[in-house]
Image: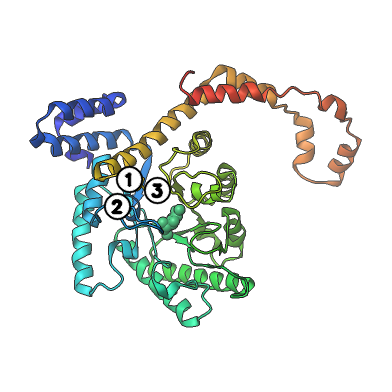
């Protein structure tokens, strides 16, 4: 897509730092007629500056019409091609979908073919890719008691069949990551279902679908997304760690990982950064859903960084420090009050907040005082580390004989207040 940018835009690439301001002043000076082209050119230039990060959105995110459990939609629905146009304008890298975000559940074959044709054109025109696909296993009443874990064998079979078809669809668009979010896999009362059976049923479905993907040559990696509650009272596999524990028990653990979401762990009052760190350490971070959420509230899906900036900073720092190179998916939606233009601001804001935090993470790493503090708080001892690295009878003996004075050890200085204040000053932009 970059190849198609006009020469004026190419010059603008040099001015990456000033793009947002430049865009606004250009648009303010240009006549109304020039606006769509200018916006598109700037978006392409913006995108070129972002190639380091794969920023993606789901059709269901910017396409969210503002419905909530108590209120009707506040925005007009957007067709998939219109969503692709918006994502092209904001310079996104890709767009993800559930089967029924793209193709309504009751569409005829002809309707499905038309929709796919139009969407393919729209993503091509906007230079977008489809890195991830998933199945809607929660919206239709058939899934009122779960999909893979339903008490009805026919519903379980239908859920697997629907996922196979949705995998075909995702593969047709080039998706390589397949997300599983078990929105309806849970209970309101444990009288309804044996939770041990539920785990077995879930595993069976995943093992079946792994083999389907392998046989079809799709090359999918499966990414499991945990959530503790909403829409079910209690959802199975409530936190990312639950899936990290399940994966080694699957038939194809090598093709399975996780898709943690900020809001989902925050709903449970957990430290999201630690969940992601566990996934990174176990080489299981296949995808990530970025958004924000006040602790302890309903599922808010706020714009990334808009509620807990400090957590967002440490998350971005973690991802950057460990060179996470997968999609950065903004699984969020604009406030219910927002109109079309403001939804665009929501999308731009999501990307910009990530980029700003990524700059701040680099600042943190380059800060001399912070680095000196890190040296001060980390005490290495090669001899002892060698002893504790792996067990042997000899090492155990030496360790038992080692002179480790707990009173001396308790006196090590840990100036964490200073370290945290410096971190906050970087986040607040005064350092
Ligand atoms: C739904 C859910 C998200 C999941 C999506 C994938 S659907 O919006 O709340 O967190 O990632 O199925
Ligand atoms: Mn999500
Ligand atoms: Mn969510």
Image vertical order of residue 82 relative to residue 310, above or below: below
Q: Earlier in the sequence, mark 2 or mark 3?
A: 2
Q: Residues within 10 Å of mark 2 (few under 14, many from 20)?
A: some
246 horizontally vs 299: left or right: right
Which residue is drawn at the image coordinates 90% and 39% (left, top)?
400
Residue assigned mark 3: 332
Image vertical order of residue 43 relative to residue 64, above or below: above
Q: Earlier in the sequence, mark 1 or mark 3?
A: 3
Image vertical order of residue 157 relative to residue 280, above or below: below
Q: Residues within 10 Å of mark 1 (few under 14, many from 20)?
A: few
Disc 3, ligand 3: is the CB inside 8 Å?
yes
Which residue is drawn at the image coordinates 47% and 67% (left, top)?
210
Image vertical order of residue 124 relative to residue 195, above or below: above
Which residue occupies the extreme right position in the image? Answer: 401
Expressed as whole percent of the image width and height from the top left, the position of residue 73 reads: 31, 56
Expressed as whole percent of the image width and height from the top left, the position of residue 115 reads: 21, 64
Quadrant position of the N terminus in the picture = top left
Which label was assigned to residue 74? 2
Q: Secondary structure at mark 2?
A: loop
Q: Is residue 177 visible?
A: no
Answer with the quarter of the image where residue 328 lies.
top left
Image region (quadrant) for ligand 1: bottom left
Q: Are marks 2 and 1 in contact (CB under 8 Å)?
A: yes
Expressed as whole percent of the image width and height from the top left, the position of residue 215 reads: 42, 71
Q: Are marks 1 and 3 in contact (CB under 8 Å)?
A: no
Which label was assigned to residue 337? 1
Q: CA distance from mark 2 to mark 1?
A: 7 Å
Q: Secondary structure at mark 3?
A: loop
Q: Secondary structure at mark 1?
A: loop
Answer with the quarter of the image where residue 104 lies.
bottom left
Circle nearer the viewer, 1 or 3: 1
């Amino acid at each position: 897509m970059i190849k198609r940018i006009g020469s004026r835009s190419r010059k603008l690439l040099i001015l990456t730092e000033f793009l947002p301001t430049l865009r606004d002043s250009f648009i303010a000076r240009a006549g109304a007629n020039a606006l769509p082209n200018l916006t598109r050119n700037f978006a392409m230039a913006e995108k070129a500056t972002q190639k380091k990060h794969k920023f993606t959105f789901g059709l269901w995110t910017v396409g969210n019409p503002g419905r909530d459990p108590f209120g009707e939609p506040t925005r007009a629905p957007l067709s998939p091609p219109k969503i692709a146009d918006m994502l092209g304008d904001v310079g996104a890298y890709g767009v993800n979908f559930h089967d029924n975000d793209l193709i309504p559940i009751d569409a005829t074959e002809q309707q499905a073919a038309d929709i796919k044709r139009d969407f393919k054109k729209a993503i091509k025109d906007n230079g977008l890719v489809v890195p991830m696909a998933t199945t809607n296993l929660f919206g239709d009443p058939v899934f009122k008691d779960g999909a893979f874990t339903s008490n009805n064998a026919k519903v379980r079979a239908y859920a697997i069949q629907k996922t196979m078809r949705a995998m075909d669809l995702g593969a047709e668009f080039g998706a390589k990551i397949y997300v599983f979010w078990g929105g309806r896999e849970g209970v309101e009362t444990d009288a309804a279902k044996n939770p041990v059976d539920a785990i077995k049923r879930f595993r069976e479905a995943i093992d079946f679908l792994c083999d389907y993907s392998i046989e079809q040559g799709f090359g999918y990696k499966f990414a499991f997304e945990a959530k503790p509650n909403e829409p079910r009272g209690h959802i199975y596999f409530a936190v990312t760690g639950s899936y990290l524990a399940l994966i080694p028990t699957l038939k194809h653990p090598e093709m399975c990982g996780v898709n943690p979401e900020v809001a989902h762990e925050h709903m449970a009052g957990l430290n999201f950064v630690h969940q992601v760190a566990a996934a990174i350490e176990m080489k299981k971070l296949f995808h990530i859903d970025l958004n924000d959420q006040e602790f302890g509230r309903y599922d808010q899906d706020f714009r990334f960084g808009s509620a807990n900036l400090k957590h967002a900073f440490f998350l971005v720092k973690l991802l950057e420090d460990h060179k996470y190179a997968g999609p950065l998916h903004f699984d969020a939606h604009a406030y219910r009050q927002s109109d079309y233009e403001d939804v665009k601001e929501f999308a731009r804001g999501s990307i910009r907040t990530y980029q700003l935090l990524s700059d701040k993470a680099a600042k943190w790493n380059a800060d001399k005082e912070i680095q000196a503090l890190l040296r001060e708080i980390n005490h290495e001892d090669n001899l002892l580390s060698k002893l504790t690295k792996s067990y042997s009878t000899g090492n155990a003996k030496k360790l038992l004989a080692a002179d480790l004075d707990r009173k001396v050890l308790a006196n090590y200085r840990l100036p964490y207040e200073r370290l945290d204040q410096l971190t906050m000053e970087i986040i607040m932009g005064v350092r």
